[in-house]
Image (spheres, rainbow, N blue to C red):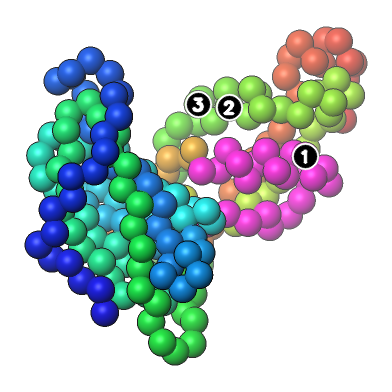
């Protein structure tokens, strides 16, 4: 078991703005001691701060909005021993912190196995940054499909944690165009949701979200009516 309760990490920090004006960040990659493979869907938490992140498929994570000071970081993953350590975060700096987890013996467990489908008695999670997502989709719209006036709708299956953070994405129904489906999956990580609630308690849920692709206006004017 690897557990480092009193370790203070003074990690390399890189400039991120004018001194003293912005909070710091911690970012890095979580790997397994077994083969140095990336650990996906590990939860990286700033203890007592209400800030956490899930590693992506490449094992990468990022913790934002940390005031200057010493912070306790805890990493949990069902197939690895937990890891806890302290890191000093300077103001206006990005702290690079790569970590390695020791694997646990036994059968593998789905890291997101305790997420459950959204139920009708829950309060529906709400997308909070609709305008930002609209601009992002327009900015990443496949140029060839835009010129041809091709649109569509991709339905995504999203795993949302109790903070409304997207931790896993999968295409539930294709738009019929792989390029549009790929854009939908990429932009999903930028979606910010008001968490789903069971009465007054925020809960982890699995939901289906449609992503509508409407051909950008200049492309419609140049290429004719959208399909």
Label 3, residues with CA under 10 Å away: few <14, some 14-19, many ≥20? few
Residue 7 seen in the current view = yes
Residue at mark 1: 179
Q: Viewed as shown, does residue 128 lie left or right of 198? A: right
Q: CA distance from mark 1 to mark 2?
A: 15 Å
Residue 40 coordinates in the image, percent (x, y): 48, 61
| Image quarter of the N terminus | bottom left
**Label pair 2/3, CB-CB below 8 angstroms:** yes
**Along the viewing direction, whichever of 154 and 49 lies nearer the viewer:** 49
Q: CA distance from mark 2 to mark 3?
A: 6 Å
Q: Viewed as shown, does residue 10 lie left or right of 166? A: left
Name the N-terminal-most of marks 1 and 3: 3
Residue at mark 2: 136
Q: In percent of the image, x 49 and y 38: which residue is there?
A: 190
Q: In percent of the image, x 44 and y 50: which residue is there?
A: 60
Q: CA distance from mark 1 to mark 3?
A: 20 Å
**Label pair 1/2, CB-CB below 8 angstroms:** no
- Dot 1: element: helix
Residue 105 coordinates in the image, percent (x, y): 41, 87
Residue 101 coordinates in the image, percent (x, y): 35, 68
- Dot 2: element: helix
Quadrant of residue 5 in the image?
bottom left
Q: In percent of the image, x 31 and y 48: which residue is there?
A: 97
Dot in front, 1 or 3: 1
Residue 214 seen in the current view = no
The magenta stretch spans which residues?
A: 168-189
Q: Is residue 157 magenta?
A: no
Q: In percent of the image, x 13 and y 59: which residue is there?
A: 7
Name the N-terminal-most of marks 1 and 2: 2
Residue at mark 3: 132
């Amino acid at each position: 078991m690897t557990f480092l309760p009193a370790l203070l990490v003074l990690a390399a920090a890189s400039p991120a703005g004018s001194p003293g004006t912005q909070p710091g960040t911690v970012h890095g990659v979580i790997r397994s001691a077994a083969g140095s493979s990336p650990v996906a869907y590990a939860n990286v938490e700033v203890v007592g701060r209400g800030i956490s992140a899930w590693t992506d498929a490449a094992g990468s994570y990022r913790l934002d909005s940390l005031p200057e000071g010493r912070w306790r970081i805890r990493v949990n993953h069902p197939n690895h021993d937990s890891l806890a350590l302290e890191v000093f975060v300077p103001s206006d700096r990005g702290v690079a912190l790569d970590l390695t987890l020791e694997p646990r013996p036994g059968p593998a467990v789905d890291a997101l196995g305790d997420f459950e489908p959204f139920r009708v008695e829950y309060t529906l999670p709400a997308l909070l940054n609709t305008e930002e997502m609209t601009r992002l989709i327009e900015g990443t719209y496949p140029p060839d499909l835009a010129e041809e006036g091709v649109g569509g709708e991709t339905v995504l299956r999203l795993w949302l944690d109790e903070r409304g953070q997207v931790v896993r994405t999968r295409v539930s129904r294709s738009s019929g165009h792989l390029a549009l489906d790929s854009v939908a999956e990429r932009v999903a990580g930028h979606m910010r949701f008001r968490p789903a609630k069971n009465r007054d308690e925020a809960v982890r849920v699995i939901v289906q979200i449609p992503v509508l692709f409407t051909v950008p206006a200049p492309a419609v004017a140049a290429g004719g009516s959208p399909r």
